Amino acid sequence: MTTQNLIDEIQEKNPNLNKTQILEMLQTERDKTGGLLSDETLLRLVAAKFGVNVKQSLFKNTGVLSSSRLFAGLYDVNFEGRVFAVYPVKIFKGEEKTGKLASLIVADNDGLLRVVLWNEHTALVENCQLEVGKVVKLLHGYTREDRYGKIELHLSNKSQIELQPESKIGDYPSIEQYVTKIGSLKLVEGNVHLLGVVKAVLSKSIFHRNDAEDGIVMRVVIRDDSGEVNVVVWNEKVDELEKKLRDSAQVLLINAHVKPTKTDCIEVHVDFNTVIDIR
């Protein structure tokens, strides 16, 4: 289907739109992607918004897109960046099939992107081939919005993952660029990424939960060059941290939670949504 055919179909279903308006929408989509997607692909996105059927297999990507230029509904997306966090593999069971999924946070020069790996691609996580700090190239994925409206990239059986050579390391920002200094935590709400050295392990205790299972909580102190903070580690993350912990270990916490105490101090909480990487 040519671009003119697409314009004709959009106008056929939406006679109130003229060609100039459609071309203006096309230019808006061009600006979003920096010219890396063809006009035909972008017109298909416009067409889909106005009720014209779009065949996913016909989306074409001519290059690597940055995280800031991604939006929901793209197919055949190529993306490259540094692995910032690796979440463990999960098994899901549906009425008709079961499978596996894992997720990454990958950083490029524009920001952080959640990447969801399906089925066979999760083997790279299980085999520890996708490690924090490594650069990867992700080919032929598709984008969608998560439940919070954020864009994420999904890799299906048609997608590919390339582990990039060391020469690519310098092309993307270091992990340190995306962490928050401990001294700035009072200005932060919600989730936070921290990098610090374990100064002390304060305590570990067992408590009784409402679901009749015992829980575990451990408190440690982490410091960086701007200050120190108490970190509260919950349940399964206690075992995970203890297995990796060593004297003066440098700890990277991804998606920890900043919470005020009753005395208006700041604590950082680590639960099942937090990734712990000992460096």
Image (tube, rainbow, N blue to C red):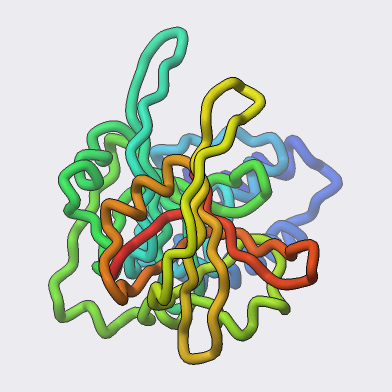
- Tell me if 149 is positioned left or right of 236 in this view: right
For the point 36% across and 80% down, which residue is it? 174
- Please name whichever residue, 37 or 143, is drawn nearer the observer in this view of the structure: 143
Q: Is residue 160 visible?
A: yes
Q: Quadrant of residue 52?
A: top right
Q: Check the image and report above or below for 251 versus 46.
A: below
- Report x, y in % for residue 237: 43, 47
Residue 155 or residue 36, whichever sits in front: 155
Q: Residue at x 55, y 45 (%)?
A: 144
Q: Residue at x 51, y 39 (%)?
A: 206
Q: Is residue 200 above or below residue 191?
A: below
Farthest right residue in view: 16
User: Farthest residue in the bottom direction?
Assistant: 225
The number of discs equals 0
Q: The C terminus appears in which quarter of the rendering?
A: bottom left
Residue 50 percent coordinates (x, y) = 72, 41
Query: Is residue 62 among what the camera can see?
Result: no
Q: Splitting the image into 4 quarters, where does residue 187 fall?
A: bottom right
Q: Is residue 157 left or right of residue 211?
A: left
| Residue located at (39% from left, 77% from top) | 197
